[in-house]
Amino acid sequence: MFGLAFQAKRIRASLGLLVAALGGFALSAEPAWAVGLNAPFENIKYTANDNLRDFVGTHLGDPDLWPYVLELNQIESPADLTPGLVLDLPVKQVQAADAALRKALDAIQTATSEGAQLFAPQEIGDAISNHDAALEYREITQWHKVVDLSDLATVLAKEALDIALAQRDRAAEAIVSDVQGAVEGRTPSAPRWSDRVREDILVEFERLRTLSNSTTQVTFRDLSRLRLNANSNATIQRMRSDPLTGNEVTKVSLVNGDFYALLNQLSDKSAFEIDVPGVTTTTQSTNFWVSNERGNAKFVNYDAANLRVQSGTSDINLSENEGVVLSNSGTQVAEVFQSAELNAPASNAILYSGIVDLRWDAYDSAAGYWLEVASDPGFNQMVVSEWGIEELHFETPELSAGRYQWRVAALDQLGLPGQWSKTRDFTIRNDKTPPFLTVLSPGDGTLSEEEIVEVFGASEPDATVLLNGKPLPVGSDGSFMINVTLQLGDNLLAIQATDLAGNVSDINQNVTYRAQTSVTILIDDLLPRAGDALATRSEALVVRAQTNAQPGAAVAIRSGTGEIIVQTQVNTDGSIGFGLPVTAQEAQFSIEILSPTGSIEGTQSFTAIRDQIPPQITLDLPPPKATDDPLLQLAGSADDALSLTLNGTTIDVIDGRFNTDITLNEDVNTMNLQATDSVGNRTTLNLHTVYDITPPDIISARATRPQGKAGTIEIVAQATDASGLRKSAPFLIEVGGQERDGFLLCETPSGVCRATLPAEPGTLRLIEVAIEDYAGNTAYK
């Protein structure tokens, strides 16, 4: 914002311009705006037929000034505004401020149309800044500052206009008139690329390139415009003017990427040439698009005048809305799509969010869409340029407050952009004033004996009003009325009004509904119990109950000795929840619901205990170590278990007893028996048995005299079995023709069965060994 003191020197230097800008008044005469600003406020009566916003809009031309009118007349709330009051209104002051703003805007627009943004950017920028500052002061009703800054903007705009008119014929042939994103340039003498910004002057043979998500616009001497889109590279090859003949020639070489050209003021003495490698163009068209990517050259002509394209043996004259693709595979000429149809937002829409969802209708056979958003109607100041959008909508980045134009073109299967849609505009407004909201009934703190209460109030007509999060219908005058069913106890009526800008006003009122009822208390049947007592494993027991007492009613929990150990209240759904300390000794407690005066309206007694003893599992018979029976029966008692599982599968427990059959798998069977009581105490019993129907595997069996022919006889057998070997194994041997029998002693871990006989001469022959496992399976050797 430019301060008045800072600009005083410029105002004095341009005093003659100021007089002209103010309509040519003599310096001694008081300006017309000063008369309006110094005029007294008008006194206007507020009647019963008036609505505050409409009343302010009628007399001041802006209904949004209603908060200022209330403040000016020292009225705290719209509810205090009664018919018959005479209000002071700054009618002349507002008219003077708005007239000065319009005058400044007209001067800025006139200067801009004559090229001030190109040739007098500082002056026109200062004019716009002062105009914007005047608008900000209007928001806070500083009418003198609005007029001062508007007049200064008018002077600066006139100065910019004079500079622009004088500079239209300056030596600079082209200028960078817009930059969005990253744009770089390189003059013939420069060793490397460097950034380009607005107002940079371009010279012959200067190269210009845009990076990703970037665009730039070049404006030539005759105000012809060329917009270079993202990832494009072009060279300004020639910009020549003959002062004697007035002939002008401009030639642009497109290395890669694409640009959109809008040529103005072309005459017989002006020529614009496009250079694409391998292609020669001649144009009388003032509106065309050119692309050069990966050896494919594309041209589209949107003008009634022809665009001639020559490549090899191809010589094509593109008529209005015709395009061509030149590639190694041939030449394709096509009529480009007509204008797409925009959908939302509507034209002239006022939006309060900087992120805008732009939508358009589908164009039949379109391969994608090209979207442009600019801050000016001529699309000279680009804000968004997106190519190849596949969806039918696009969400802009955060935009600042201001007015924007947007348009869309459909892309065909050849990648040729069709005609631009009709342009739509929208305005993003910065509104931070909460909406008007008043609630007339019921009052805060109301005590109701009726279940139904009427909620009545008013807000702004275009505001969204919610009651406890649900929409309320609002009349054309902003009023609302609804009947609300109350719950017993305290009821919060939260009324919220939200205007189109998202500003929020809130009013909360509390209404208490009291009704006479017979109070009952029911303790939750699902709570764990040990016998008749409520039980828990921890030091604290959580108790849940339900009552028909009024929500918010006080609740006291007393011990058996009458001491209050916990205090709480009834929840809105009639539930009661609390925790209390318990021990292994069963104790007596009571729940009391109290009236607002402290009397007892209902009571319920209960006992509680801390239970940390897990249930005991007792088997009638332990499972065998090994068996050849595929069915195993488990039976026994599980004490006070609420649930019993075997390997995760539930087993029925009836009167503390269980009995179940288990189908065994061959080899080792592991059984996990787990009992859990009502409070979660748990006992686990792990059991094992081997189901074995396979006889032992006798690896070897022999009878020998380890100490020689006169030594003792030793019989040794080696065997393995999953269930283990029984301790004794019968054998039969022959010694010197005589049979001897007996038993080998077996060791399960090693699988060795062994017996020693006294020394006896004769030939040894082991006739048979029989080895048995614990499952009763026998192997013979």
Image (cartoon, rainbow, N blue to C red):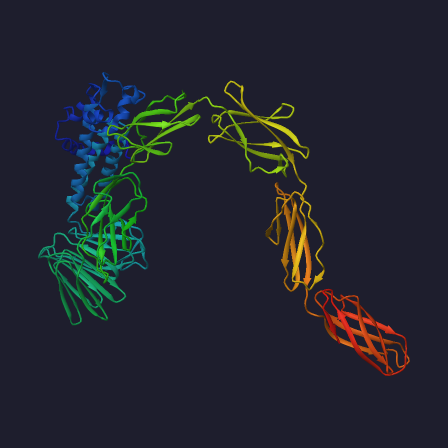
Q: Quadrant of the C terminus?
A: bottom right
Residue located at (21% from left, 56% from top): 260
Q: Quadrant of residue 402?
A: top left
In the image, 634 versus 582, the foreground residue is 634
- Residue 493 shows in this picture: yes
Looking at the picture, how far across and down is residue 731, in whole percent? 81, 74
The total number of labels drawn is 0
191, above or below 134, in the image: below
Answer with left or right where residue 781 lies relative to residue 60.
Answer: right
Answer with left or right where residue 727 lies relative to residue 58.
Answer: right
Answer with left or right where residue 665 lies relative to residue 701.
Answer: left
Q: Quadrant of residue 296?
A: bottom left
In the image, 133 versus 241, the foreground residue is 133
Q: Quadrant of the N terminus?
A: top left
In the image, 395 versus 344, the foreground residue is 344
Looking at the picture, how far across and down is residue 301, in whole percent? 16, 59
